[in-house]
């Protein structure tokens, strides 16, 4: 049965960030992920994680100025100095907090020869630096509806890129929500790209609420992960339709139905 990690950037927003760790543990989660920890000292975040008895699944490298519209720096050659500094920051946080994975965001950019070359160099640099610290790196295609203009918006292109790069420390972050919106055919895509997959996330389509509340049979897909032999955490990167705890019935329903999937 898949293990679930609460995404604290979207879930338990009823509470301040550092209080969400214990709330996730109280709700039955064994791990957490989130977008960015950088507003807090790394040691403070690590203490919140340890106090709640949780594992860290993943968080993102600094994306630039998120509030101003930045969605990553890797494909932006004119921001290379800032990107290189972000590698140092994220690895520093990752070692203190104890995450096994970092997610590298590509940025808003046309996928032309210049941005592709910049992205390739950036992913290699980040993969090398994370690997030296014993930390994996994942890249994630994001759908064009939620994030227009995002450089990495195609699962097939991402797979070809990872295969061509052939970096031992770079894998795919497979978000079921983004795949369904961008391509459909989630089962076949997941089966085909599973050998490249280092982390999985889920949310219902189209409203990005709790699994089981949208157009896709999320429980079937979660069962498929078991059949494929996925042993990592599934990040619950969804926006609760109401309060976070009131919407957690899907986990109980899934555990009851798992034998029939």
Image (cartoon, rainbow, N blue to C red):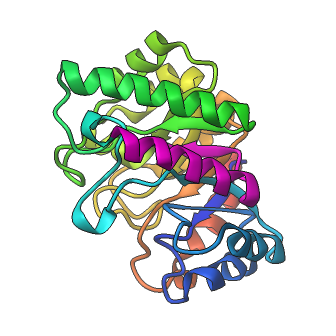
Q: Position of residue 173 (x, y in %)?
A: 50, 38
Q: 47 above or below 149?
A: below
Left or right? Give the position of 110 relative to 200: left
Counting from the top left corner in percent of width and height, residue 105 is at 40, 44
Q: Is residue 222 magenta?
A: no
Q: Residue at x 33, y 44 (%)?
A: 142
Q: Quadrant of residue 157?
A: top left
Viewer-closest of 76 and 46 = 76
> Is 20 placed above or below 33 here?
below
Q: Is residue 48 left or right of residue 18?
A: right
Q: Position of residue 38 (x, y in %)?
A: 53, 66
Q: Is residue 36 above or below residue 128?
A: below
Judged from this view, the residue extending furthest toward the front is 81
Asked if residue 101 lies in the magenta stretch, the reply is: yes
Taking the image as drawn, is residue 258 in sight? yes
Whether residue 105 can be seen here? no
Residue at image x 74%, y 68%?
Answer: 46
Left or right of residue 210, residue 135 in this image:
right
Residue under the image location 65 percent in, 57 percent down = 93
Q: Quadrant of the C terminus?
A: top right
Measuring 44% from the left and 64% from the top, which residue is drawn there? Answer: 238
Where is residue 121? Give x, y as percent: 41, 23
Range of magenta residues: 80-103
Q: Main secondary structure of the magenta part?
A: helix
């Amino acid at each position: 049965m898949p293990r679930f990690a609460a995404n604290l950037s979207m879930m338990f927003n009823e509470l301040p960030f550092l209080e969400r760790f214990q709330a996730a543990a109280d709700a039955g989660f064994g791990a957490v992920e989130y977008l960015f920890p950088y507003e807090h000292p790394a040691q403070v975040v690590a203490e919140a994680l340890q106090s709640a008895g949780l594992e860290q699944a993943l968080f993102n490298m600094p994306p630039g100025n998120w509030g101003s519209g930045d969605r990553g720096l890797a494909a932006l050659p004119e921001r290379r100095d800032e990107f290189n500094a972000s590698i140092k920051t994220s690895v520093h946080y990752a070692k203190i907090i104890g995450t096994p994975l970092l997610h590298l965001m590509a940025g808003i950019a046309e996928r032309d020869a210049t941005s592709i070359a910049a992205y390739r160099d950036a992913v290699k640099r980040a993969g090398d630096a994370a690997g030296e610290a014993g930390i994996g790196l994942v890249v994630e295609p994001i759908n064009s509806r939620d994030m227009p203009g995002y450089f990495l918006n195609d699962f097939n292109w991402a797979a070809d890129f990872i295969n061509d790069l052939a970096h031992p420390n770079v894998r795919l972050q497979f978000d079921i929500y983004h795949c369904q919106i961008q391509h459909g055919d989630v089962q076949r895509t997941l089966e085909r790209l599973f050998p490249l997959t280092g982390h999985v996330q889920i949310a219902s389509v189209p409203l990005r609420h709790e699994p089981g509340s949208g157009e896709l049979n999320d429980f079937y897909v979660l069962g498929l992960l078991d059949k494929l032999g996925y042993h990592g955490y599934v990040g619950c990167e969804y926006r609760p339709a109401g309060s976070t705890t009131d919407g957690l019935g899907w986990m109980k329903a899934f555990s009851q139905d798992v034998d029939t999937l």
